[in-house]
Amino acid sequence: MLKMLERLKEYLPSIVLLTAILLVGIKIASQVREIVPAGGKGIKAETENWGLGFGGEGAQPTGNASAAALKEYDAYYVGDAGEKVIYLTFDCGYENGNTEAILDALKKHNAPATFFVVGHFLESAPEMVKRMVEDGHNVGNHTYHHPDMSKISDQAAFQKEMDDVATLFNQVTGTQLSPYYRPPQGKYAASNLQMAKDLGYATFFWSLAYVDWNVDAQPSHEEALEKLTTRIHPGAIVLLHNTSKTNGEILDELLSKWEEMGYRFGRLEEVCGK
């Protein structure tokens, strides 16, 4: 027994050290684990592509991350499930002749929208941006150069992408950019969302979109209307692209169909409160 006690005494410092390391590891793990609310998905540290899982017709889809987890970062992908409201958003990479028709349809239906613009659009289509403001729409930040922002770890570099859009928008319109941000390509990570939040932005993903971005393979009117009416749901944040010829041609009819289904068109501030 005496020999066992002596041997235990010999190894005691190592045991204490290992115990301390284990406790520190547990504490660190608890601090960096995903934010996972009951029944939801958390935000991962590594880059993810925003994606959706659809259920029944008229039901809100599930996202890569839950609405509750996203809200920790002032980020959103869907609104209230209890109200038949649609939030229209358009990503604007460049102007190819469809934005005017989109704006005309929105004006006809008195439907507000948010246009997420990049630097090139501000540079090449300032008159369209001015009309967006004059028509009462919001203009949000889609970054200046459309990079994978989740890969940018330097706060100053991240902020420059955002600030350059806000500065040029102010020069073009004389007004302030809306504090709404959409990550290019829907790529995100916890650090990316936190940096946007620290800059005062609410991040917006989407709960309904379709393949409208390929200008060389545009969907037919029938295909577009079928997808956008059967998958619409209360609180939908709809992503459309201004470069889509189909969108420019069907938007008036699409808005009418949604109205006939009992929906109204809301503003993103109803979702994020700013």
Image: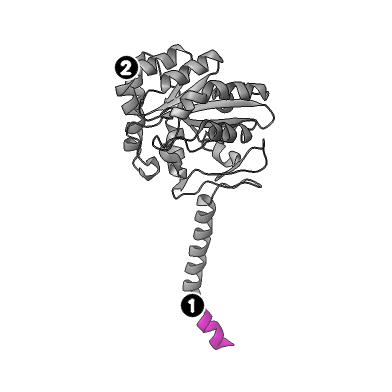
**Location of residue 26 in the rendering, given as x and y in whole percent from the top left corner:** 53, 59
**Location of residue 57 in the rendering, given as x and y in whole percent from the top left corner:** 67, 38
Report if residue 7 lies within the magenta region. Answer: yes
Q: Residue at (51%, 78%) from the top-left corner?
A: 9
Q: Which residue is identified by label 2? A: 171
Callout count? 2
Q: Is residue 12 above or below residue 57?
A: below
Q: Residue 230: name its quadrant.
A: top right
Inspect this view and state whether residue 76 appears. no
Secondary structure found at label 1? helix
Q: Which residue is identified by label 1? A: 11
Badge 1: how crowded within 10 Å, few (<14), some, or many (20+)?
few
Report if residue 42 lies within the magenta region. Answer: no
Q: Quadrant of the N terminus?
A: bottom right
Range covered by the magenta-colored residues: 1-10
Q: Residue at (48%, 15%) from the top-left corner?
A: 104
Inspect this view and state whether residue 247 appears. yes
Q: Is residue 30 above or below residue 199?
A: below
Badge 2: how crowded within 10 Å, few (<14), some, or many (20+)?
few
Mark 2 or mark 1, which has the lower sequence index?
Answer: 1
Under mark 1, the amino acid is Tyr
- 151 lies left or right of 201: left
**Location of residue 217 in the rendering, given as x and y in whole percent from the top left corner:** 42, 38
Q: Main secondary structure of the magenta part?
A: helix
Q: Is residue 189 above or below residue 111?
A: below
Under mark 2, the amino acid is Gln
